């Protein structure tokens, strides 16, 4: 009889511990799910619908439907590019969290000649090097290599070399990327406050 009671107590104890572990797991899953549902630009995926505040030379306010969420990786650091469509064509929005959340929108593509550079000049750019665009001076803040995951798909990852220039007022940036060892793309971006981005829908799943 005593042996049976001991066995019963042990079983009840194991059952209680299993319930506690299951309950904790459910709470963690619920917490992760609720965080993913927060209306933050970091949670926007394909199918998301957002509105960008006035920006660009015409200070336009743009509604944008996200068609892809691309990922950049460098070491253990990740940042994102939301590609979308608006009434004016394709829009690219960079989303990065370093010390704080930062977002910037591409204003237009640039030719290297607009930067006063040739393809060979990129090999000699050092931190602090400067270029000028539309009367603004930009200084090279960072350069390196990263992996680009189109749509977040690691199976289609590409490697690129990049150069990031920042304006003296920190409101604009010039980015350059070398793809496939030869093709160089350059573009002008403008910083916008993440708090001013209006989010109507996170993704297709939230329809």
Image (cartoon, rainbow, N blue to C red):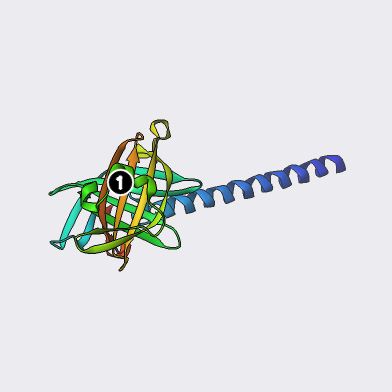
Q: Is residue 76 visible to us here?
A: yes
At x 42% / y 35%, what residue is drawn?
Answer: 154
Residue 41 versus residue 94: which sits nearer the camera?
Answer: 94
Residue 51 image offset from top left, x and y in percent: 22, 57
User: How many numbered discs?
Assistant: 1
Residue 158 versus residue 4: which sits nearer the camera?
Answer: 158
At x 53% / y 48%, what residue is drawn?
Answer: 26
For the N terminus, the image quarter is: top right
Q: Residue furthest bottom?
A: 169
At x 74% / y 42%, what residue is drawn?
Answer: 11
At x 62% / y 47%, what residue is drawn?
Answer: 21
Residue 126 image offset from top left, x and y in percent: 41, 54
* 149 relative to 173 in the view: left or right: right
Residue 33 image offset from top left, x and y in percent: 44, 50
Q: Is residue 68 visible to us here?
A: no
* 15 relative to 55 in the view: left or right: right
Residue 71 versus residue 160: which sits nearer the camera?
Answer: 160
- Quarter of image, res 83: top left
Residue 187 versus residue 202: which sits nearer the camera?
Answer: 187
* 129 relative to 48 in the view: left or right: right
Residue 77 image offset from top left, x and y in percent: 47, 49
Circle 1 crowding by C-alpha within 10 Å: few under 14, some 14–19, many from 20: some
Residue at the spot of label 1? 203
The secondary element bearing badge 1 is classed as loop
Q: Residue furthest top?
A: 155
């Amino acid at each position: 009889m005593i042996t049976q009671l001991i066995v019963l107590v042990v079983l009840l104890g194991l059952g209680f511990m299993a319930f506690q572990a299951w309950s904790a797991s459910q709470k963690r899953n619920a917490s992760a799910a609720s965080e993913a549902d927060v209306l933050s630009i970091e949670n926007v995926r394909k199918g998301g619908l957002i509105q960008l505040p006035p920006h660009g030379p015409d200070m336009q306010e743009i509604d944008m439907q996200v068609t892809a969420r691309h990922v950049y990786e460098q070491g253990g650091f990740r940042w994102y590019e939301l590609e979308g469509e608006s009434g004016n064509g394709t829009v690219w929005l960079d989303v990065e969290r370093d010390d704080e959340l930062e977002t910037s929108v591409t204003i237009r593509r640039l030719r290297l000649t607009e930067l006063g550079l040739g393809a060979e000049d990129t090999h000699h750019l050092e931190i602090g090097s400067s270029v000028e665009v539309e009367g603004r001076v930009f200084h090279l803040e960072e350069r390196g290599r990263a992996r680009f995951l189109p749509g977040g798909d690691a199976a289609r990852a590409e490697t690129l070399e990049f150069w990031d220039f920042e304006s003296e007022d920190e409101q604009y940036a010039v980015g350059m990327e070398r793809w496939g060892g030869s093709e160089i793309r350059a573009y002008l971006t403008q910083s916008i406050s993440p708090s001013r981005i209006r989010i109507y829908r996170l993704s297709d799943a939230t329809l």
